[in-house]
Image (spheres, coloured by chain):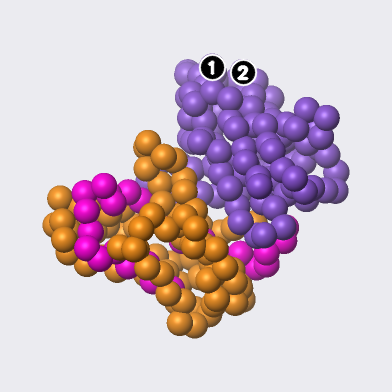
């Protein structure tokens, strides 16, 4: 079975550029989560969707960040404009339900903003 | 609101020794609790989960955890550490909103 697929795995960009990270959840999962991992702040939940609808975006740092889920098999996280402090590993995860179901994580997208 | 606290950001054990990684949770509703492991440059993998069934939960790779409501704890243990257990371990809590909230993580070092 294919797991959660993220792209790109690595992205190096310059400050001010737009960054788009992509995620394909596991088929049949109806919840999708975006996390950011840094040494200083650990794993932070940015936003999560249930049945393609954003449920909680309180973790999105600021207006430069936006996330969409146009259908059940695709989500994007966009940063515009990017800043050096956005450098982190961004993880996408999906879950079968909002209850006891565990999250399955992708391998992450490592973003470096110069 | 839910939260977890992992006691000790780094734990070092000798190969063959007991592994004990501590986690305390806070939750206003009966919690679902998880332990995840992260190997370098990889995503997180589920080790085990507690969902209000048996309080002693067995997971993969010989790990287990015990839910203790009176102590609000969910500590992770393994009787005998292997070199391959060296990784970062995360405790997490999930409430009825569906959000999974992680602790700060504990790096396990296994010495030969």
Q: Do the residues labelled 2 and 1 touch (CB within 8 Å)?
A: yes
> Viewer-proximal residue, B78 or A56?
A56
Report the residue at 79% width, 47% height from top: B30
Residue B46's x, y, as percent?
60, 49
- Furthest residue to the front? A63
Question: Which region shows up in magenta?
Answer: A75-100
Q: Which residue position is annotated with label 2?
A: B17
> Is residue A47 depicted above or below B24 in this figure?
below
Q: Can residue B62 be seen in this view?
A: no
Seen from this angle, which residue lies furthest right?
B54
Which residue in the protein does label 1 denote?
A: B14
Position of residue A29 measured from the top left corner of the image (x, y, whole percent):
60, 72
Q: Is residue A53 above or below residue B44?
A: below
Q: How crowded is mark 1: few (under 14 residues within 10 Å), some or many (20 or more)?
A: some
Q: Which mark is residue B47?
A: none
Instruction: State the orange chain.
Output: A
Indicate whether A107 appears above or below B57.
Answer: below
Relative to B34, is A3 on the left or the right? left
Residue depicted at x 47% and y 18%:
B112
Q: Which chain is purple?
A: B
Neighbours of disc 2 within 10 Å: few (<14), some (14-19), many (20+): some
Q: How far, Cα to Cα, is label 2 from label 1?
A: 5 Å
Residue at coordinates 60% horizontally, 52% vertically from top-left? Answer: B100
Q: Which chain does the numbered disc 1 sit on?
A: B
The location of residue A67, given as percent across then percent down, is 41, 69
Question: Relative to A42, is A46 above or below?
Answer: below
- Helix, strand or loop under label 1: strand
Q: Is residue B70 magenta?
A: no
Residue found farthest to the bottom: A71
């Amino acid at each position: 079975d294919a797991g959660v697929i993220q792209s790109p795995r690595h992205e190096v960009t310059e400050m001010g550029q737009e960054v788009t990270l992509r995620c394909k959840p596991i088929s049949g999962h109806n919840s999708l989560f975006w996390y950011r991992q840094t040494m200083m702040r650990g794993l932070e939940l940015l936003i999560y969707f249930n049945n393609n609808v954003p449920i909680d975006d309180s973790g999105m740092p600021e207006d430069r960040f936006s996330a969409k889920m146009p259908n059940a098999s695709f989500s994007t996280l966009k940063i515009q404009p990017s800043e050096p402090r956005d450098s982190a590993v961004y993880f996408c995860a999906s879950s079968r339900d909002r209850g006891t179901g565990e999250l399955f994580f992708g391998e992450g997208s490592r973003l470096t903003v110069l | 609101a839910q939260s977890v606290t992992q006691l000790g950001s780094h734990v070092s054990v000798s190969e063959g020794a007991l592994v004990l990684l501590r986690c305390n949770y806070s939750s206003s509703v009966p919690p679902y609790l998880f332990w995840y492991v992260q190997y370098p440059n990889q995503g997180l993998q589920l080790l085990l989960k507690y969902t209000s069934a048996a309080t002693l939960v067995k997971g993969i790779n010989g790990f287990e955890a015990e839910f203790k409501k009176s102590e609000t704890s969910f500590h992770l243990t393994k009787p005998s550490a292997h070199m391959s257990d060296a990784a970062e371990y995360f405790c997490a809590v999930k409430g009825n909103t569906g959000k999974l909230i992680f602790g700060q993580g504990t790096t396990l070092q296994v010495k030969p």
